[in-house]
Amino acid sequence: MTTSTKRQFRLTGWHVLAMFVAAFGVIIGVNLTLAFNAVSTFPGLEVPNSYVASQTFDDRRAAQEALGWTVEASHDNGEVILAITDPKGYPVQPASLGAKIGRTTTARDDRTPEFRFDGRAWIADDPLAPGNWTVWLTARAHDGTEFQQRLDLHVKG
């Protein structure tokens, strides 16, 4: 007669502790990784002091709205096109114009292309990759009024 000695697994307190430590270790590791990536890719503040900026916001907005400018951003054949029009629909050539183009979620792809006015719109050579982009436009009217606008731009792939 042969006797088979088969060892049977017993779930002990140490096994349960190891499972809990492993499970929470994975959760904490994932949370730390996500938090690190969120902080390291944050593009930064819009303004250094939001309280000070808010004190003149209404006056700046009213002056900008009084200009009546409308801005449309598009991308075609490797060119970024900013069409600024007045209330009558005529093209506007401000005294100065600057724009930064970048992704909403990271500052890694931010760029400041050189725009030129072609008589109808502002054009810059910039072959943007497909996806969503943001254009931060800053212009100054001939009367000194500052015009700022953030535009969403979708580039088809």
Image (spheres, rainbow, N blue to C red):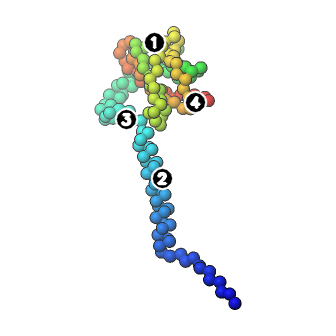
The image quadrant where one finds the C terminus is: top right
Amino acid at circle 2: Val
Mark 1: give few (<14), some (14-19) or many (20+) Cα within 10 Å. many
Label number found at residue 126: none
Front residue of 85/68: it is: 85
In primary-sequence order, the first of circles 3 and 1 is: 3
Name which residue lies at 53% across and 75% down: 11
**Front position among marks 1 and 2:** 2
| 12 relative to 42 in the view: left or right | right
Of the numbered discs 4 and 2, the one sitting upstream in the chain is 2
Mark nearer the N terminus (3 vs 2): 2
**Distance of label 4 from label 2 (alpha carbons):** 29 Å
Circle 4 SS class: loop
In the rendered structure, which disc, 4 or 3, sits on the residue that comes first in sequence? 3
- Tell me if I can see residue 49 in this picture: yes
Residue 30, numbered circle: 2
Which residue has dot 4 on it?
Answer: 130
Q: Residue furthest right?
A: 1
* Position above or below: 47 against 23: above
Q: SS at mark 3?
A: loop
Q: Are marks 4 and 2 in contact (CB under 8 Å)?
A: no
Amino acid type at image mark 4: Pro
Residue 65 makes an appearance in the image: no
Real-space CA distance between mark 1 and mark 2, rounded to the nearest whole angstrom: 51 Å
Q: Which of the two labelled residues, at mark 4 and mark 1, occupies the earlier sequence position?
A: 1
The label shown at residue 93 is 1
Q: On the image, numbered disc 3 is attached to which residue? A: 45
Q: Viewer-nearest of labels 4 and 3?
A: 4
